[in-house]
Amino acid sequence: MSNYTLTDLFVGQVARIQRTFTEEDVHLCNTLTREFNSVYKREENVWKPHFDGPIVPGLLSEGLITEVISTKLPGTACVLLQKEIIFCHPIYIGDTISAELQVIDINHERNWITQKVSCYNQNGKEVVKGQVVVFLLPNENNR
């Protein structure tokens, strides 16, 4: 865990994390959210005309993004205020996704940081992009 304070952060700062998504990840996500869409199931045929395999729920890639926020940048007590995400290409079971966040703005008055989001698969194809705004909980170091 990085545990940056607002004064430690700078525009251009980058953090990354990587994860390979498994069928078990998809099953656990579906069970927790109660979303049992057939596009996530290998034994279904509905995805075949459109995708190369069953896809990973968007919520899992979003979880990878929030993992970067909570463990690396800023890696401190914070709240996600805004999230704008575009899913450019499907993520498949077995794909290894690298999530990269870059600080693009720091609002010291509000304790907000804005970060650019880029996620790439193992082939270097951008699969998710967007932006997040995070509120760092004020403490003696974040003022």
Image (tube, helix red, strand yellow):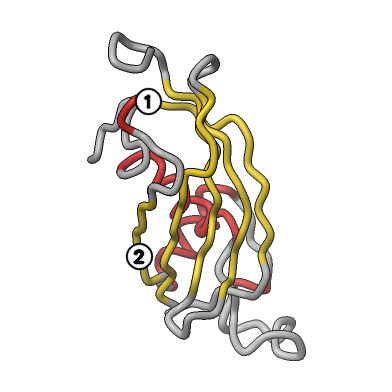
Q: Quadrant of the N terminus?
A: top left
Q: Earlier in the sequence, mark 1 or mark 2?
A: 1
The residue closer to the viewer here, 18 or 53, is 18
| Amino acid type, label 2 | Gln
Determine the residue located farthest toward the front in the rendered image.
Answer: 11
| Amino acid type, label 1 | Leu
Residue indicated by mark 2? 18
Q: Height in image: 129 above or below 80?
A: below
Residue at 70% across / 89% down in the picture?
48
Q: Quadrant of the C terminus?
A: top left
Q: x, y (%) of residue 35?
A: 64, 55
Q: x, y (%) of residue 22?
A: 40, 72
Q: Is residue 51 left or right of residue 124?
A: right
Q: Quadrant of residue 133 in the image?
A: top right
Residue at 50% across / 25% down in the picture?
135
Callout 1–callout 2 Cβ contact below 8 Å: no
Residue indicated by mark 1? 6
Q: Height in image: 66 above or below 92?
A: above
How packed mark 1 is, by other alpha carbons closer than 10 Å (few <14, some 14-19, many 20 or more), is many
How packed mark 2 is, by other alpha carbons closer than 10 Å (few <14, some 14-19, many 20 or more), is some
Residue at 55% across / 57% down in the picture?
30
